[in-house]
Image: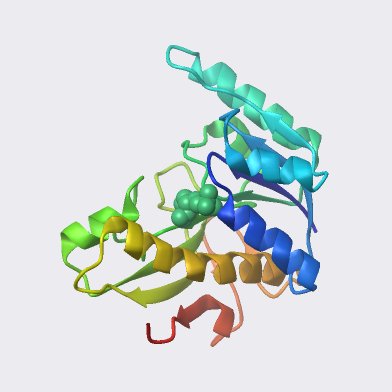
Amino acid sequence: MDVAVLVSGRGSNLRAICDAIDAGTCDATIVAVISDRKSAAALEYAEGRGIPTRVVPLKKGDDRGLWNDALAREVSSFEPKLVVLAGFMRVLGAPLLDAFTGRIINVHPALLPSFPGHDGAQDALDGGVRLSGCTVHVVDSGVDTGPIIAQAAVPVLADDTAQTLHARIQVQEHQLLPRVIHQIAAGAITLHPLQVHAPAGDPTRALVAPDV
Ligand code: GRF
C-alpha cells in the first residue's frame, strides 16, 4: 500500500514505520514525506533512505487557502492510498480532506477524546489523570476529533514531566501506528469518513503498555 507521510518535526514515528517496513511487519511503501517545515529532521531521515521529500511551507501572513491547495496538489501527485500524519502540526483544509476522505490518519499523544490539541502530554498532567496514552484516528476537519481507530495506554507516574510522559507515550506510538497501517493495508481495518470497521476484539485496536 502506497503511503504519504506528513511531518513537521523529529520524525520518530516515521522511523518506526520505516523500521516496521524493513522488518516485514508493515506491508507499506512510503512514496513521499511531505513537511510544512524545511528544518524538520524527519526530512533528512527520509532523504537518507531515498524517499522523495517535499516542503510546502506556511509562513506568517501566507494565504492559508493557497497553502491548502498546494499541499493537496503535492500529496495527490504521489497518488498514495493512505496519508499518515506523523507529527504534522497543521490543521488540514478542505482540499486535502476532500481528495482523501477517510484515507488520512493521525497519531495523537493522548487518549482522545480527552486532551486534543498540540500539547496532549502536558494537558494530561494538568488534568491529573492516572492513565494516558496515544490514539490513532481518522482525520476530519476538527482538531483531533475524527473516529478513533486504535489506542494504547500508559500509566502517568507521580514524578512525570510532560517530557517523560511524552517519551513513554511515544514508545507506544511507535508500535501502534505501524500496526494500524499494516492492518489497513491488509484490509483488516477499513476506514470511512464517519466510522471505522474492524473485527470485534481485534487486538490491534486496544493495547495496554506493560508495567513501567
Ligand atoms: C507524536 O507524539 C505525535 O503523537 C504528535 O506529534 C509527535 C510527533 O513525534 N502528533 P515525532 O516527530 O514522530 O517524533
Relative height, residue 185 to residue 145 (above, below): below
The answer to whether residue 9 is left or right of residue 158 is right
Q: Quadrant of residue 75?
A: top right
Q: Residue at x 45, y 74 (%)?
A: 152
Q: Nearer the viewer, residue 67 or 18?
A: 18
**Residue 49, percent from left and from top:** 79, 48
Q: Residue at x 67, y 61 (%)?
A: 17
Protein image colouring: rainbow
**Residue 158, percent from left and from top:** 19, 73
Total count of labels: 0
Q: Quadrant of residue 115?
A: bottom left
**Residue 142, percent from left and from top:** 41, 44
Q: Nearer the viewer, residue 45 or 172?
A: 45
Relative height, residue 100 to residue 37 (above, below): below
**Residue 212, percent from left and from top:** 37, 82
Q: Nearer the viewer, residue 8 or 68?
A: 8
Q: Residue at x 46, y 71 (%)?
A: 151
Visible residue check, residue 99? no
Q: Quadrant of residue 129?
A: bottom left
Which quadrant holds the N terminus?
bottom right
Visible residue check, residue 116? yes
The answer to whether residue 102 is left or right of residue 21 is left
The answer to whether residue 25 is left or right of residue 174 is right
Q: Residue at x 79, y 33 (%)?
A: 77
